[in-house]
Structures are given as structure tokens and as C-alpha cells.
Amino acid sequence: MKIALCGQLGAGCTEVAQILAAKTGAAVVNSETAIRGIATGTTRTFMELQRRIASGEVDIDRLIQSQLQEIADENEKVIVEGRSGFMLLDDESFFKVLLVSPEETRAKHIMERRHVTLDEAKAEIRHSDHERKGLAERFFNKDWLSPTNYHMVLNTGLSTFELAANLVLESYEAHAGR
């Protein structure tokens, strides 16, 4: 089981991934997991790695993508969630899901999770949307919100995260058994 759970910031990738992991025993991986692996796996100091990233000598996104691929290769059951999922858009071994939700719903979710104001949450969403769009374009020359990039697109603003996780799991199982 390999699922790339891509999504807009605030659409519930983390929550849906956690529910799926509880149901399947899959490992959940995201950018933070990959960065921790990079930081602990390097012989250089973290400060040296930061310097090389800032100078452009190291492309952190490509480094994260490589680390994600290693983690995916090592795990039979893995869910790559959030921003990291977009780094696997061309990986045929993953069942790809896009979670979307209306901006207002996303902003309220971000407010609760990050304890920020509505305006701050909306600013974070706009920044994240721009960044994720750029990532998909730079890595794959693809539109990050195009439904043709995914096996499934789900609006979490119209359901609960539990229902979303159940739908993803049902769809994955149907796809895997075809």
C-alpha cells in the first residue's frame, strides 16, 4: 500500500493520513519526516546543511524527494501526506489522492490547528497554494490542482475527515484489486 495524499493546506491531509494509518498500520511520512531523516543521516552539521541550502548549492526539495523515495522503498505500507505528496506525482507505484476544500473552511481549520487569526490563516493558505503550485510546475510541469494527476479528488469541506479516510481506503482497495 502506497498512497500519496496530496492536498491544499487546511484540507485535512494530516488528519486523513492519521486515520488511514490507524486503520491500516501504514507509516505516515511528510516533509518533516524527510527533513529529520536528512538531518540525522548527514555527516555534516545541520548548520552546514542550512548554509548549503541557502547558497543554492543544495536543492532542499530534491533532497526531500530523494529521502521520501528511500522511505517509500523501505516501507510496504506508507502514506506520504501534504506537500510531500506532490513530490510523487509521477511515481506510478503510488495511489494519488488530492484533498481540496473551500478557502474559508481551510482557514478555520488552520486557525484551530495553529492558533492564528483568520487573516493569518488565509495568508498562510495563499502562500502555501502558491508554493505547492510552483513545486508541481518545477518538478513535473504539471498543474497541481488538475484532477487528471490523481486517482481520486475529494472535497473534505463536504464531509468529515473520517468519511474522507474511508472513501480513500475503499477507492485504494478497489484500485489495487482491479
Image (cartoon, rainbow, N blue to C red):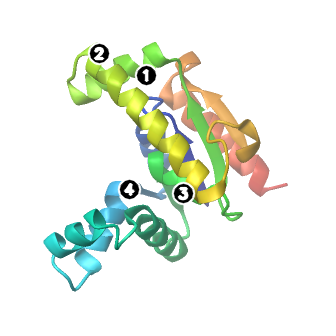
Q: Quick check: marks 4 and 3 in contact, CB under 8 Å? A: no
Between 54 and 136, the residue placed more toward the observer is: 54
Per the image, the residue denoted by label 4 is 31
Q: Quick check: marks 4 and 1 in contact, CB under 8 Å? A: no
Other residues around mark 2 within 10 Å, as few (<14) / some (14–19) / many (≥20):
few
Kind of residue at disc 3: Met
Per the image, the residue denoted by label 3 is 87
Residue 106 circle label:
1
Instruction: Determine whether 37 is above or below 6 in the image.
Output: below
Q: Earlier in the sequence, mark 3 or mark 2?
A: 3
Per the image, the residue denoted by label 2 is 119
Between 63 and 79, the residue placed more toward the observer is: 63
> Which residue is at 31% across, 72% downward?
38
Instruction: Determine whether 64 is above or below 141 in the image.
Output: below
Instruction: For marks 3 and 1, give the one nearer the viewer.
Output: 3
Other residues around mark 3 within 10 Å, as few (<14) / some (14–19) / many (≥20):
many
Label 4 to label 1: alpha-carbon separation: 20 Å
Q: Secondary structure at mark 2?
A: helix
